[in-house]
Image: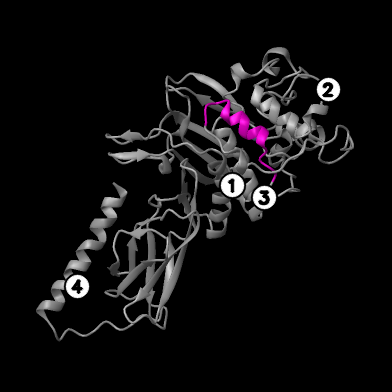
Amino acid sequence: MRIGSYAAGWTLPVLLAVLGCKEDATAPEVPEPAAITIVSGDNQIQGRGRDLHEPVVVRAVDAAATPMAGVTLSFLPGPGSGSVSAGSAVTDSIGEASVIWKLGETVGAQQLTVMSAAGSAQATVTATARQSDFDIQIVFAATLTPEQEDAVRAGVERWTQVIVNDLPDISFPQGYAPDNHCSGLRGLTIAPGGVVDDVRLTIDVSESERRRVYGGLCDWRIETREPFLVNIVLTSSLLNTLDAGALSGLVAHQTGHLLGFGWRWSRLLRNRVREFGDGADTHFPHALTVAAFDDAGGSEYDEGGKVPVENYEYPQLADYHWRGDVFQDELMSAWNHRWANPGWKPTSNNPPLSAITVQAMAALGYEIDLSKADAFTVPVPGAAAPASPRDPRSASRHATLKMNPVEIFDDSGNLVSIIYK
Ligand SMILES: [Zn+2]
């Protein structure tokens, strides 16, 4: 749908320009633009050989930076950089032209050069092609800066590297309007005929201080329980205190939950805190995940069942994270919930996404690429002093008590889980 509407948008001006030339050979030539600026669509990440989700939009401007209408621009993919929906396009009344860029098969950076007729003005748009066929389409709130968008992409991309399978497309012949706890999320509204492949994630910014960050699960594939419509909301005050690395890490942690880490574990867990209370020996006994834990140094662990899961503070931490005291700074450790603390300052910008976590996602049914997991060693027990500010009991547990839970509903409106406070 979206591609079709953009195609219609540039075809007509091109036709008019061609006709105009034939009928009036003395029409004044449009001067060369002084520069071409990239309006949007730069730095996207997508599976190799696929269309980027957002069109590439550029603007032609004169020496006074005034937009220039009627300028023909060429769009030239670099070697191995795929193809575009049109090799040239004419700028509209606000000086903008756009194309859809389909990436080539080369994994890594790809380039698209945009050039004026005489070549005096140029811009280079960059995209990254990934090997994996698993894709998360991100829909950003308008208030995010380009730097914040890049940081969010980097966080989400950590999951699209380690989860590799293309899930069945979800088609919406009649369109989709989010309801229940997701009503009002415009980024999740889908036009009739729209398709989600594989997950659509909105990033929203809230002015409310009631919850600093929360994730919402709006819909999932019925048979496999794999989510496909999800959102992350951050308060603007939190967003503006995070540097790029911290924002990336926070988004990566949240995205892990939204893909199922924690909330889809019910039958995979033993000794759940929700049944046995604080201090239970909660653990995740999935064989391949235990093997990954042992490989990372966990073979020395002798304090209970493997793999140890957080066992204090249900529901904001317990049953949903690796045990903080054991995993410490791993991406899905309870310790990485410290952003819930209003006084939190990031100490580790890119906590490792370990093979243990990747195997836990395989236990949920995802196909994985272990080679993309980050290096991680289970810290030696007792290595962190009890009074360390990293101790979750002082750093995050008490702080989260004031937060409110985010409830997850199934498609019948039944509360099935609570993922955060
Ligand atoms: Zn968490």
Q: Quadrant of the C terminus?
A: top right
Residue 374 rendering spot, x and y as whole percentages:
67, 43
- Residue 313 within the magenta-colored segment of the rendering: no
In the rendered structure, which disc, 3 or 4, sits on the residue that comes first in sequence? Answer: 4
Front label number (2 vs 3): 2
Residue 334 rendering spot, x and y as whole percentages:
72, 33
Q: Work out whether residue 307 or residue 195 is closer to the camera in this orientation and state it.
A: 307
Q: Quadrant of residue 228?
A: top left
Residue at 40%, 52% (x, y): give it. 52
* Picture disc at residue 155: 1
Q: Is residue 98 above or below residue 164?
A: below
Q: Is residue 227 above or below residue 82?
A: above
In this rendering, position of residue 310 left or right of residue 34: right
Q: Secondary structure at mark 3?
A: helix
Q: What's under tag 2, amino acid-wise?
A: Asp
* Picture disc at residue 17: 4
Question: Does the rendering let one see residue 261?
Answer: no
- Residue at mark 3 to residue at mark 1: CA–CA distance: 9 Å
Residue 104 rendering spot, x and y as whole percentages:
41, 56
Residue at 53%, 20% (x, y): give it. 416
Q: Which residue is mark 3?
A: 246
Q: Tag 2: Cα neighbours inside 10 Å, few (<14), some, or many (≥20)? A: few
Q: Tag 4: Cα neighbours inside 10 Å, few (<14), some, or many (≥20)? A: some
Q: Tag 3: Cα neighbours inside 10 Å, few (<14), some, or many (≥20)? A: many
Q: Which residue is mark 2?
A: 302
In this rendering, position of residue 270 left or right of residue 4: right
Q: Which residues are magenta?
A: 351-366
Residue at 71%, 43% (x, y): give it. 375
Q: What's under tag 1, amino acid-wise?
A: Gly
Q: Is residue 312 above or below residue 400?
A: above
- Residue at mark 1 to residue at mark 4: CA–CA distance: 43 Å
